[in-house]
Amino acid sequence: MDLSAFAAEVGDHGPVTVAGLGTRGGAVAGVRAVSPPSGIERIQPEEMTVSCAAGTPVDDLVAALAEHGQTVNLPAGGTVGGALSVGRSDYRLLGYGPLRDVLLQMHYVSASGEVVMAGGPTVKNVSGFDLCRLFVGARGTLGFLGSVILRTRPIPTHSAWFRIATADPRSLLAGLFRPISVLWDGEHADVLLEGHPADVAAQAAEFALAPCEQPMRLPTGRRWTASLAELVASPPDTRPFVALVGTGVVAGDGIGDGAAAPGMTGGPDAARHQALAAAVKHRFDPEHRLNPHRYSHGNGDSGSGART
Amino acid sequence: MTPELVERLVAAVGRDQVRLGPAELDLYRRDASNIVGAAGAVVFPGSTVEVQACVRACADHAHPFVARGSGTGLSGGATPLDGAVVIAMTKMNRLLSVDPVERRAWVQPGMLNLDLSRAVAHLGVHFAPDPSSQQSCSIGGNVANNAGGPHCLADGVTSAHVLAVEVVLPDGSLVQLGGEADEVDGYDLRGAFVGSEGMLGVATRVCVRLRQNPPAVRTLLMDFTSVHAGAETVSAIIAAGMVPAALEMMDRLCIEAVEAYVHAGLPTDAAAVLLVELTGLPAAVEADTAAVADIGRAHGARQVRVAADDAERALLWKGRKSAFGAIARIKPNYYLHDTVVPRSQLPSVLDTIYRIVDQHQLLVLNVFHAGEGNLHPLLVFDKREPGVMERVHAAGEEIVRVSVAAGGVLSGEHGIGLEKREFMPLMFGPADLAAQRELRRAFDPAELANPHKVLPSPATCGDIHAAPEGAWI
Ligand SMILES: Cc1cc2nc3c(=O)[nH]c(=O)nc-3n(C[C@H](O)[C@H](O)[C@H](O)COP(=O)(O)OP(=O)(O)OC[C@H]3O[C@@H](n4cnc5c(N)ncnc54)[C@H](O)[C@@H]3O)c2cc1C
């Protein structure tokens, strides 16, 4: 995929921001905005990969993959580049794994306006340092994604949501075999099961799960981490909250309060961690021209913007 | 090694944990590859604080250091260059804590891979990455090389199972990268560290994800009269929307060697066998087992053997996992390669590999992670034969080039180390390599952690340090 026009637009000096569809906070206000190309290049179900441009809408990609019996573990809405740059998994984090594991190869435009490639086209690869994972969740502060190769997965034969009232979802986590999602709001657990219909029915029966049409809404604001034991013992008093049971992640409404997610920097070394993240930022974007203000101490966010 | 640095190391770990004698230094000159370097000293820290003190001592003396796990690496990753201090992690081998509810564990990096899975087995969970070397390789080495194994097809390689790493940075300071949750905000420095081959610092604690043991398991062995039929079966299984837990292939010479060694009842007249494992809930496993068998038969499988019980299953896996022991019956030496190609390219690349090996008058056994297109051509030879090493290296280089040209990559799990460093430009252009070097320098501006690995350095090209004994180029 030819990224030279996009690279020229990014250029090599002056502040610049990248715009997707604006569903996840959008471009940085008041800064010259560029848009990556869009379009699906190649769907390869027998390789379980797809290559596409970063500006491709996620929903278009998912629809195109569905025609080949495949899907991709990206949260719905917005662009592929936006979803990867924000780096937050959706409700399927437990069963499908984190978003960062879908990016196999990327071509990005660097702060010096060059097209840079990292990763590899195959589903398995350990050639060189793993810049792909570094870029997932970096909020466009290290380089702007131009095109990517993503890992896809087969669409499950059967998939169904269930609901159960419970003040302690730990027995569900202990007993269910690899649920795709267990969402818990303090009172109910919504469970997504996938696979063979007979297995799904048997698991639902064993745990007295009732079918449910629509799962609870996953808040798209603040996120933090907490152990299940903690959450059950003292559920947060700020409602709503939804725990992605088994992943350590809790989602709430409202705008990020700037506090780092607990467990993120490991306590006493927080200052050294910030310095390390700052060094990475400095190496990739010495003049802080890419998505200015989005970066703060490796938190990828100044705490002022919407974290959606 | 200056006496001052030696004294600093002694102060760090105690005199009996610093080894300087020629016999001991000799043991640490290499890993399981045939690339030989030279160690200045070997130290055995017992705690994070001791690792910090060793690293700080090296940093203060601008002396290189190399973290070492079990030394089973195959790319020269743990080979010390320039008289580096080898920091051997073998004493830090404890399981620190297990959370059975959220299924994670904190371990010290020297813990052996199989010891971890054994230690948590009573909880009905395991650590998914299972390199064939799992009895002897360390979790720290797995993290540094982003190791894979036969059972990584469905669940991914090490990076997908590491939540957090405590790292002594090359200046001696300590950070935790990642967190106990599956996803934390901010730069994924954890992701950058995994697979960095000891060049970004020394891991001193690792938080791993543990996976539920599957309630149902089926293991099938299918044999084919051509390698093509076997490889096409692999693609057809994936294209049918199934992701087996394992999908492994062996070719004829390998089958013969393994059968003579473990007597697993493998068909020695077959051109290829596929070992397929399906795991999960019972109905899915039964349905997929039938579907895989049908696909195999449609592609000409002569026999589809479904392991009747755990004992038969263990026997089939023993066959797969003892391939390395078995080859000693053919020739005394081997060189194991590791490249990945798109699954659809397996038949043609395998053909080319047979041709390359023929041209160089060598023998090859193929035993590999077919489900991921991860080839492991095993060249066997007798190194006492004059000129044989040149032929082994020439054939190896051609295999690497052919794999990359087929849309593949240099390494699927063994890493770049020294072995494939000079091949990096086959995949990456100057700007791509420069970006990787920036990451390295963000962590290690002085470039003291495992120097000269992974990234080809134009500046040191032709330099004696850059071309250790046994290296390819
Ligand atoms: C017979 C055989 C079969 C194998 N099969 C497989 C397989 O199926 N899959 C696979 O992926 N690999 C396989 N390997 C390769 C090897 O076992 C793996 O790469 C393993 O992960 C290396 O672990 P180790 O403890 O031996 O590391 P070492 O060889 O000691 O070191 C490897 C690298 O890790 C770094 N390192 C080690 N510990 C640390 C630490 N604490 N902090 C930072 N860096 C560190 C070293 O500097 C070096 O760069 C096989 C090897 C053999 C000999």
Image: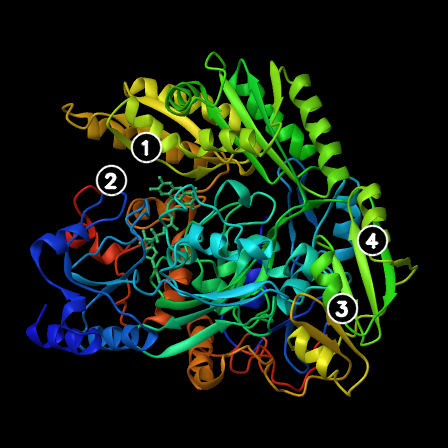
Disc 3 and disc 2 in contact, CB within 8 angstroms: no
Residue depicted at x 64% and y 63%: A84
Q: Which amino acid lies under the numbered mark 1 shown in the image of this protein?
A: Gly
Disc 4 and disc 2 in contact, CB within 8 angstroms: no
Considering only vertical position in the picture, is B75 above or below B270? below
As helix, strand or loop, the secondary structure at mark 3 comes to loop
Disc 1 and disc 2 in contact, CB within 8 angstroms: yes
For label 2, the residue is B472
Calculate the distance from the C-alpha at mark 4 to the C-alpha at mark 2.
59 Å
Calculate the distance from the C-alpha at mark 1 to the C-alpha at mark 3.
53 Å
Calculate the distance from the C-alpha at mark 4 to the C-alpha at mark 3.
15 Å
Q: Is the residue indicated by label 1 positioned so its CB lies within 8 Å of ligand 1?
A: no
What percent of the width, then of the height, locates residue B141?
37, 55
Q: Are marks 4 and 2 on the same chain?
A: no
Chain under callout 4:
A
Which label sits in the foreground, 1 or 3?
Answer: 3
Residue depicted at x 48% and y 43%: B149
Tell me if A99 is positioned left or right of A118 in this view: right
Calculate the distance from the C-alpha at mark 1 to the C-alpha at mark 2.
9 Å
Chain under callout 1:
B
* Residue B247 shows up from this direction: yes
Mark seen at residue A169: 3
Q: Earlier in the sequence, mark 1 or mark 2?
A: 1
What percent of the width, then of the height, locates residue A153?
69, 45
Q: Residues within 10 Å of mark 1 (few under 14, many from 20)?
A: many
